[in-house]
Image: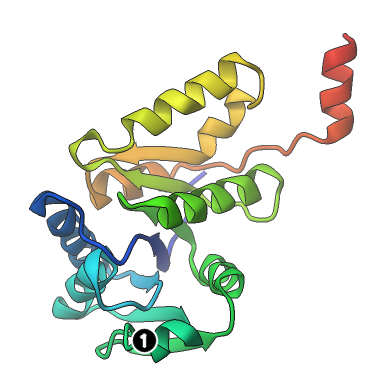
Amino acid sequence: MSVEFKSITVFCGATSGRLPEFEEAAYQLGRNIAEGGYELVYGGGSAGMMGAVANGTVDYGGKVTGVIPQFLVDRELAHQRLHKLEIVETMHERKAIMNELGDAIISLPGGAGTLEEFFEMYTWGQIGLHEKPLGLINTRNYFDPLLAMFDKMISEEYLDDKYMKQLFLGEDFSSLIHQFKDFEPVEVRTYKDLQKGHRS
């Protein structure tokens, strides 16, 4: 099945990390989104990885929608060069709108907040709240420990390995979008299915 995408939601943090390669990868992702004719949806901030991915898209003529809570706007963290800025009240509302606006979801390296956003999107896909592919930009093998944790969850039977089919790994946008286009939603298992598995 070939899937068409118009907008890409990107989750990332307001810090840049220790090494310049991380911010460079964020800027390059934004640039690639613009050059591919896609729209960027992201968290609306101007600093760190968020600022870099937005700048990459804007600098190369792409459209950007930011979604940011009012309390962060009050801290003067909102990006001023966006085509559209949606101001919401809560962090949860922010994630819900970002999920709604994007046809696919990518996470860049980041901290606890970025991982929380990634896992909520992953879980929503697992329980059928969306049918979108998720990608990780694995700059400097940043997400390798996370992938090892997924292996552990599978081996301990806390995660069905079929749900790894909604998750894709790449070094850049072109490798991810190529994989996204062949994505097929995973059939959601019910709790009754899980109970049958334990009884069998």
Left or right for 117, reference 12: right
Left or right for 103, reference 171: right
The amino acid at mark 1 is: Arg
Give residue 91's quadrant in the image: bottom right
Q: How many marks?
A: 1
Q: Quadrant of the C terminus?
A: top right
| Colour logic | rainbow
Q: Position of residue 137 (x, y in %)?
A: 29, 46
Judge whether 48 appears above or below 127 on screen.
Answer: below
Q: Position of residue 182 (x, y in %)?
A: 45, 42
At a point 40% along the width and 72% down the height, the residue shown is 43
At a point 46% along the width and 79% down the height, the residue shown is 67
Helix or strand or loop: what does disc 1 sit on? Answer: loop
User: Mark 1 = which residue?
Assistant: 75
Judge whether 25 appears above or below 127 on screen.
Answer: below
Q: Position of residue 63 (x, y in %)?
A: 31, 80
Residue that sits furthest to the top in the current view: 200
Residue that sits furthest to the front in the current view: 75
